[in-house]
Amino acid sequence: MLRSALLAAARSTNVRRIVESNPLTGPVVDRYVAGTTALDAVAATRALAARGMRTTLDHLGEDTLDAGRAADTVNAYRAVLGSLGDAGLADRAEVSVKLSAVGQSLPVDGEKIALDNARLICEAAAAAGTTVTLDMEDHTTTDSTLGILRDLRVDFPWVGAVLQAYLRRTEQDCRDLATAGSRVRLCKGAYAEPASVAFAERSEVDRSYVRCLRVLLEGAGYPMVATHDPRMIEIALDLAARAGRSAEGFEFQMLYGIRPDEQERLAAEGHRLRVYVAYGDQWYGYFMRRLAERPANLAFFARSLLGR
Ligand code: FDA
């Protein structure tokens, strides 16, 4: 119930106005968002690299209905990729892109504009010497996003994508993408989805996550295990060992600000650990999804708004 309400609020302009205009929101948002500028994102990468971790940088923004704004997002990615190259950090960081931020939701030619824009970001990533992963948004975009992935991989075979274990289709998508050279980030899924396409119970989502993990870890691609769930992490380690994968053969990924001690522990144990670093001023949708993931976050948020 609470999760659905928060996810509905994540797409409400009215709630957005209230939350964004409250000055007390800032410190809570800071837990999940690394700053507003490319320099902040590069600084976060430098700090995490010093502790043996990699990053994937997300310039916040989504669902744009303005082609000019989509072009601004492309420029923001080009800028941060250039800064990573200049700072000598391109081997420690890549970028994550939401196609709805670069045009996918535009009413006319959205898919083509998103593909062209994503291509520009891939060119900048190639010039910097790093990679791009396509985030996955709600289920109405899955086919479009996987289609754009296929097109991009013709010229940029290292482009990765996210698959969401809560979708009923995902086990098959994992099979299709568990091929040599492919990079797949497996997460549970963060959007409000109908039962016709997604598992509703947490236990069903977890079971699907394990089935998908098995397909990816036994397959020929490069799995990126995106979860903070201790049980999923243990199972991934076990399945990776059984599949004969070395520490370089897969990686764990977690969100900036969530279970940082576990991030350090896994990195210190010699596992590849990449932190998803969100930055920018369009934090609202991202922040609300983080609140929805853990009800305790809402109480914490409410207390901080009340100044207690
Ligand atoms: P689960 O929700 O069961 O959480 C396990 C434990 O982690 C919790 O008990 C708690 O301790 C901690 N935790 C989880 N979320 C927390 C939070 N917000 N605040 C504090 N603690 C928290 N989704 C999507 O739909 N499309 C995408 O492209 C991506 N991309 C993505 C990239 C990366 C690198 C990660 C790690 C995650 C995503 N996600 C995503 C989000 C993902 O779908 C999911 O919503 C969250 O990762 C939470 O699920 P867990 O697997 O962590 O398990």
Image: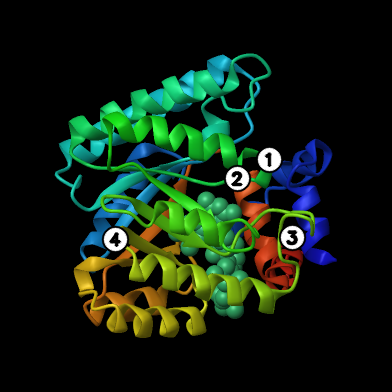
* Residue 10 badge: none
Amino acid type at circle 4 is Ala
The residue beneath circle 4 is: 220
CA gap, disc 3 to disc 4?
A: 48 Å
Kind of residue sitting beneath label 3: Leu
Residue 251 visible in the current orientation = yes
Q: Considering the numbered disc 1 on the image, is that residue within a helix, a strand or a loop? A: helix
Beta carbon of the mark 2 residue lies under 8 A of ligand 1: yes
Q: Please, is residue 31 above or below residue 213 in the view?
A: above
Residue labelled 3 has its Cβ within 8 Å of some atom of ligand 1: no
1 with respect to 224 (left or right): right
Question: Mark 2: which secondary structure?
Answer: loop
Describe residue 86's horizontal placement relative to residue 109 as left or right. Answer: left
Return the disc, 3 or 2, that comes first in the chain's sequence. Answer: 2
Query: Label 2 is placed on what type of residue?
Result: Glu
Q: Is residue 282 visible?
A: no
Q: Which residue is mark 1?
A: 140
Q: Callout 3: 10 Å neighbours few (<14), some, many (20+)?
A: some
Residue 137 is marked as 2
Residue at mark 1 to residue at mark 2: CA–CA distance: 8 Å
> Which mark lies nearer to you, 3 or 2?
2
Find residue 256 and report its horizontal and vertical position in percent.
45, 61
Quadrant in which ligand 1 is drawn: bottom right
Quadrant into which the C terminus falls: bottom right
Rounded to the nearest angstrom, the CA distance separating label 1 from label 3 is 34 Å
Estimate the x, y position of residue 71 in percent, counting from the top left. Answer: 47, 19
Q: Secondary structure at mark 3?
A: helix
Using the rendered view, name the quadrant where residue 204 is placed.
bottom right
In this figure, which residue is indicated by the disc labeled 3? 305
User: Is there CB contact under 8 Å for labels 1 and 2?
Assistant: no
